[in-house]
Amino acid sequence: MASVVEYKGLKAGYHCGYCDSEEGKASSGMWAHSMTVQDYQDLIDRGWRRSGKYMYKPVMNQTCCPQYTIRCQPLQFQPSKSHKKVLKKMLKFLAKGEISKGHCEDEPMEPTVEDAVAGDFALITKLDAQCDLRTLSGDFRESLESEEKKKIKSLKKEESNELIQSQDIEEKLGSGEPSHSVKVHTVPKPGKGADLSKPPCRKAKEIRKERRRLKLMQQNPAGGLEGFQAQCEPPALFPAKAKSNQPKSLEDLIFESLPENASHKLEVRLVPVSFEDPEFKSSFNQSFSLYVKYQMAIHQDPPDECGKTEFTRFLCNSPLEAENPPNGPDCGYGSFHQQYWLDGKIIAVGVIDILPYCVSSVYLYYDPDYSFLSLGVYSALREIAFTRQLHEKTPQLSYYYMGFYIHSCPKMKYKGQYRPSDLLCPETYVWVPIEQCLPSLENFKYCRFNQDPEAVDEGRCKDPDRLQVFYRKAVMPYGVYKKQQRDPSEEAAVLQYAGLVGQACSERMLLFRS
């Protein structure tokens, strides 16, 4: 099944949910009737993002709050001090029912409602009615089948080439070793009152342990060390020094074993977003009730703005076609709800897309009664660990996309705390480490991150005549279609669309024209 989209053009001068500007926002949008996971992967790598079936791309040099696509590198990720506090807080709660008072210092904020489309609600509602695939489906599927058969050979060849290229890129990007936070005994600098002839200072605890070890050895020369280990710690596989220098992995911190009499049980379930899936269907009402509670308590939404229709449209309807290739993850690709079940009830839901090269976070809603568990941070760390798990079977799936980073909006800067991470250059669509971007963002809202002035967008549309159009039940190249059109505004809209989606997507996706 090919991707089918309707381009809706550029919309400027409307309300921004980030800075509350009445008319500072500008973005381009399109409605996706259906979309392959590869096409959506390529689109988010060009700055697009979805809300339900509506795809939008901020006009970066015009919009009041530029939104930069951000991705984290899970394979090199090391949890920060505040991340560890959140994970330990969860373990204490599960093990003993302990509720910590107050929030951790420097704790990142919970993700907020998708302000990005705050001004698009009316438009999306209208499009939802106008662009329902059911009005197209019969004719559409029929006329596509023959086209698909013709294309399938060339597409397979193209996809295998892209996969090889992307794997090469992944290998280059993923070769960096993780940065461990190792404590190193440093000798004080000369001139600071240090006597360099003496050994470095040792902690009193270490000195006491050493004295005790010597005493035990004197009492029992043959088995002195065994006695010491029996009284203190079990024998380690590695020397004590190596052990103390090895930081706990993210998985160690998340999956630490709980006592048999633990106060609570937490289970995370991955459910495909489909009303045909029995698990999704059976948990729908509970999940929806949680969404309403969250929106009303955290974002002060009135009840009429968080009904079943809104919930389904934004968080259950997805254009992504589920795919289960043999070399893909066991769960397949597509849209999912990651449900957090505490003692048999849902307390949080992370809406995610699993794509060929990444897990993309769409949204999170949770029970406000459990805010003390910092579920926004906790779920992000679980999603990073989940990406690492998927990577084991599907090596090219190695990134975690966190949506948009908005430097000019303080409540959205928390995403920059998951390191190492990269921001997408809005002009050349290459990834740049966030550390290199921040100095420029301190001075300017809009920045080109690629430092090479000669660099251009390599994926730009160079040949719009090859763009695929779906018109009057037939698929044709734009070169053929434009000969039948006399409206000059039609060409401008098609070329604008081609420039935004790039050559590869313009040749694979079908642009619906009525």
Image: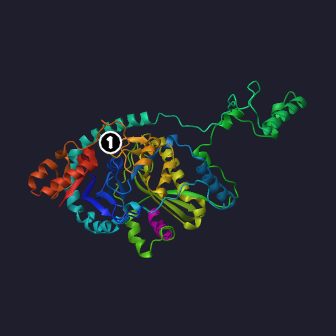
On screen, residue 16 above or below 328: below
The reply to whether residue 254 is visible in this rendering is no
Residue on which disc 1 sits: 428
Q: In this view, does 513 lie to the left or right of 105?
A: left
Q: Residues within 10 Å of mark 1 (few under 14, many from 20)?
A: some
Judge by depth and name the residue closer to the eye, 227 or 151: 227
Q: Quadrant of the C terminus?
A: bottom left
Judge by depth and name the residue closer to the eye, 375 or 509: 375
Q: In which quarter of the image is residue 127?
A: bottom left
x, y percent for residue 237: 69, 34
Q: Which residue is drawn at 21% across and 57% down?
A: 512
On screen, residue 300 above or below 400: below
- The scheme the figure's colours follow is rainbow
User: What range is drawn magenta here?
Assistant: 278-293
Say if the magenta span includes residue 287. yes
x, y percent for residue 178: 54, 37
